[in-house]
Image: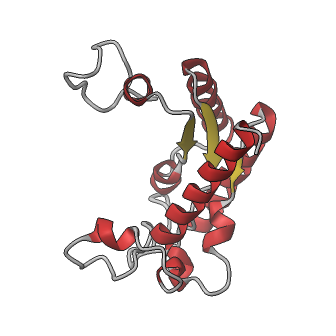
Amino acid sequence: STGIAPPTDECEPQQTPLECEIRLIRPRWALIMSGTNDALLGLPLGDTYRQELTAMVDRVRELGPVPVLSTLPPMVVPSHTGEAGETRIAEANQIIEQVATDRQVPLINLHAALTAPGMVDQGLAADGLHLGVYGGEGQPDIMRGSAMLTLPALKYGANRRNLIWLQVLDRLDRAAEGK
């Protein structure tokens, strides 16, 4: 974790946000989807991104939960350096897949799910960066819209991601319990 977020009364001053969250909620699994902003901002990927992601996976594992990596969603806007968004996302996703293999952690291929036939705008909102939500971004309760798991709603990125992550957590729990 980067330690960017300010500490709260629940966090120890020396804890990173990642360490604090894990200490407070003690999850069995930790879903990790990180890198979209790196791709957008034109930050280095390659070895730098691989090392940071590997360190995050290792730290989560040290703290107790099983890390679960997710590929990044599509990005149709160019990066701040002018490079095509999908080129940057493809590079990041290749690294995510390599880290999942190297560290032997589960991988969710969210990118594949959002680029599947039938998805609205590859699961993206009008800005081409954030996930789209059933009912649109202008609705009064966007969180409620993203929690809809009906067939029409699952054509939108946030809704599809939420269902996939719930399904993955269920499968992981069943596997851990030997079912």
On screen, residue 60 versus residue 142, left or right, reads: right
Q: Is residue 136 something that shows in the picture?
A: yes
Residue at image x 52%, y 84%?
Answer: 120
> Nearest the camera: 136 or 165?
165
**Residue 53 at x, y percent in the picture:** 61, 35
**Residue 173 at x, y percent in the picture:** 65, 43
**Residue 145 at x, y percent in the picture:** 34, 74
Q: Quadrant of the C terminus?
A: top right
On screen, residue 109 versus residue 15, left or right, reads: right
Q: Is residue 19 above or below residue 29?
A: above
Q: Is residue 178 above or below residue 162?
A: above
> Nearest the camera: 66 or 90?
66
Q: Is residue 77 something that shows in the picture?
A: no
Toward which corner of the image does residue 119 lie, by quadrant? Answer: bottom right
**Residue 115 at x, y percent in the picture:** 64, 75
Toward which corner of the image does residue 84 lie, by quadrant? Answer: bottom right
> Nearest the camera: 57 or 10?
10
Residue at image x 54%, y 65%?
Answer: 163
